[in-house]
Image (cartoon, rainbow, N blue to C red):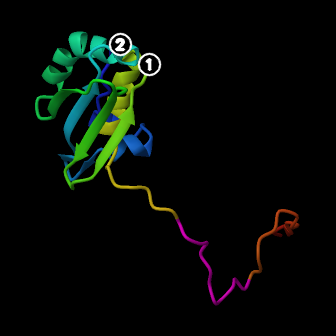
Amino acid sequence: LELCTFHPAARARTHKKHANMSIRGVLQLSKLTLNYCRVGGSSRGMRQFIEEELPKLKETLPTLEINVAQKNGHHPFVVGEYVHGNVKEVTCRNEDPREIMRQINFLRGQYGMPVKKIAHRQRTRRPSIQGGWSPEGEINVTPVP
């Protein structure tokens, strides 16, 4: 499995959400907890990930605190705790180790801040003197002599 790395030269080519994984060089994800059930069928992929891929992940990310918690009777999920105290949970029910690694990369590439909904559209007291835009509007192009 491939851990998504963020090289500074490649950062300009990546989507903006991947570039937001750090603020001033400080990684925002501070702690990662893998929760699974010892006998549950939906935790099969998580158990396989813990046995095969977790040691490689710990070698690759020595600064990240990675914990494993056994919660019998529950579906598997990954909990990411961020520097500023926010927590994000991602379910890993019936997922294979590759998808679990994708979920971990998803958590690494986030600020951890909640998404804010924009309450209303922006309005102004001084509308444009050029007039409002409409899709049916005509474009008047005058040739330059």
Q: Quadrant of residue 103?
A: top left
Q: Is residue 105 magenta?
A: no
Q: Quadrant of residue 130?
A: bottom right
Q: Looking at the picture, tell me which residue is in the foreground, 122 or 100.
A: 100
Q: Give the magenta range.
A: 118-129
Q: Are marks 2 and 1 in contact (CB under 8 Å)?
A: yes
Residue sitting at the far left: 62
Q: Is residue 56 left or right of residue 95?
A: left
Could you say which disc has been placed on residue 94 in the image? 1
The answer to whether residue 115 of the structure is visible from this angle is: yes
Disc 2 secondary structure class = helix
Vertical order, 24 against 136 (above or below): above
The C terminus lies in quadrant: bottom right
2 or 1: tag closer to the N-terminus: 2
What is the x, y in percent for residue 2?
32, 18
What is the x, y in percent for residue 110?
34, 44
What amino acid type should be assigned to the residue bearing mark 1?
Answer: Asn
Q: Looking at the picture, tell me which residue is in the foreground, 75 or 94.
A: 75
Q: Give the overall secondary structure of the magenta segment.
A: loop
Disc 1 secondary structure class = loop
Q: Looking at the picture, tell me which residue is in the foreground, 19 or 57.
A: 57
Residue sitting at x 44%, y 19%: 94
What amino acid type should be assigned to the residue bearing mark 2?
Answer: Arg
Q: Is residue 48 left or right of residue 96?
A: left
Q: Quadrant of residue 141?
A: bottom right
